[in-house]
């Protein structure tokens, strides 16, 4: 398993860092060497970070908590949206709205407006407005849908956020730290690992690298949710067999 993972990481180019002139000295423990003015990331450290992150995300998902996937840079946007949808978690893939975590109640209230716009556009009411108003409502809907659709199922603060490039997502990291939300990130040689609780050192500019790491993290979330489902089935089985829910709880 470890050999296969190493091969996948190398083929995806996870070990390629930034130019040595752009490095953050705090990333020194995660750097293996320098080749042609490019830092090479130690794949062993990438595997350690990835396995640690997978274990944590599996525990979070198994406990029924939310994981928010954040990746607004061009290389990460599509992957973050696809994998978050696959594992049934909220995501931000276009633009981080200030206050998404620190002013969560207000952000949730804007979702009510999004639902109102969807109702207007889906019915006959839109035809009662002038063409200018219809155009304004359509623009408002598109903007709100782009910014809020990924978090419309986030009815409470997440326990963890997964980010691609914490330097790019500095506002999300700052809000998460302020709210006590665990931060997990794919972090390149130009970023500060002290800003992240669970760093995964690796190339955060390559589409293949991002796809591989995020896919593994989404798989961990799915495994945690599946384990939680298995536990519920196991706990409810004695109750059905004995017809006594209290006895089943006592045995558990």
Image: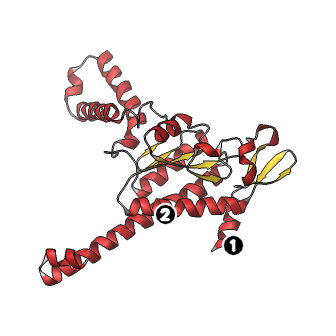
Residue at screen point 33% across, 73% down: 230
In percent of width and height, residue 58 lies at 45, 63
Secondary element type, mark 2: helix
In percent of width and height, residue 245 lies at 15, 75
Residue at screen point 86% across, 51% down: 35
In percent of width and height, residue 9 lies at 68, 61
Residue 243 got which mark? none
Q: Nearer the viewer, residue 94 or 98?
A: 98
Q: Which residue is mark 1?
A: 3
Please rate how many residues cluster around mark 1, counting C-alpha atoms within 10 Å: few if below 14, some from 14 to 19, many from 20.
few
Is 34 located above or below residue 56 in the figure?
A: above
Q: Earlier in the sequence, mark 1 or mark 2?
A: 1
Residue at screen point 43% across, 40% down: 179
The quadrant of the picture occupied by the N terminus is bottom right
Residue 211 quadrant:
bottom right
Q: Which residue is mark 2?
A: 220
In percent of width and height, residue 188 lies at 68, 46
Q: Nearer the viewer, residue 233 or 52?
A: 52
- Please give left or right for residue 74 compared with residue 159 in the image: right
Residue at the front extreme, as displayed: 250
Is 144 located above or below residue 197 in the figure?
A: above
């Amino acid at each position: 398993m470890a050999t296969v993972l190493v091969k996948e990481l190398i083929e995806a180019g996870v070990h390629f860092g930034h130019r040595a002139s752009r490095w953050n000295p705090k990333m020194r423990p995660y750097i293996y060497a320098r080749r042609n003015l490019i830092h090479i990331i130690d794949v062993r450290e990438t595997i350690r970070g990835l396995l640690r992150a997978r274990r944590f995300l599996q525990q979070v998902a198994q406990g029924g908590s939310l994981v928010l996937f954040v990746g607004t840079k061009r290389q990460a946007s599509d992957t973050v949206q696809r994998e978050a949808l696959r594992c049934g978690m909220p995501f931000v893939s276009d633009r981080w709205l200030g206050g998404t975590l620190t002013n969560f109640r207000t952000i949730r209230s804007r979702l009510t407006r999004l639902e109102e716009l969807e109702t207007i556009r889906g019915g006959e009411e839109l035809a009662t407005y002038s063409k200018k108003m219809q155009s304004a409502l359509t623009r408002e809907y598109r903007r709100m849908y782009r910014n809020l659709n990924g978090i419309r199922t986030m009815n409470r603060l997440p326990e963890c956020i997964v980010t691609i490039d914490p330097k790019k997502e500095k506002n999300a990291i700052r809000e998460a730290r302020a709210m006590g939300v665990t931060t997990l990130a794919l972090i390149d040689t130009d970023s500060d690992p002290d800003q992240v609780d669970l760093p995964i050192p690796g190339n955060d500019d390559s589409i293949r690298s991002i796809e591989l790491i995020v896919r593994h993290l989404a798989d961990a979330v799915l495994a945690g949710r599946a384990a939680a489902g298995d536990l519920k089935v196991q706990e409810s089985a004695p109750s059905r067999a004995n017809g006594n829910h209290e006895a089943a709880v006592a045995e558990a």
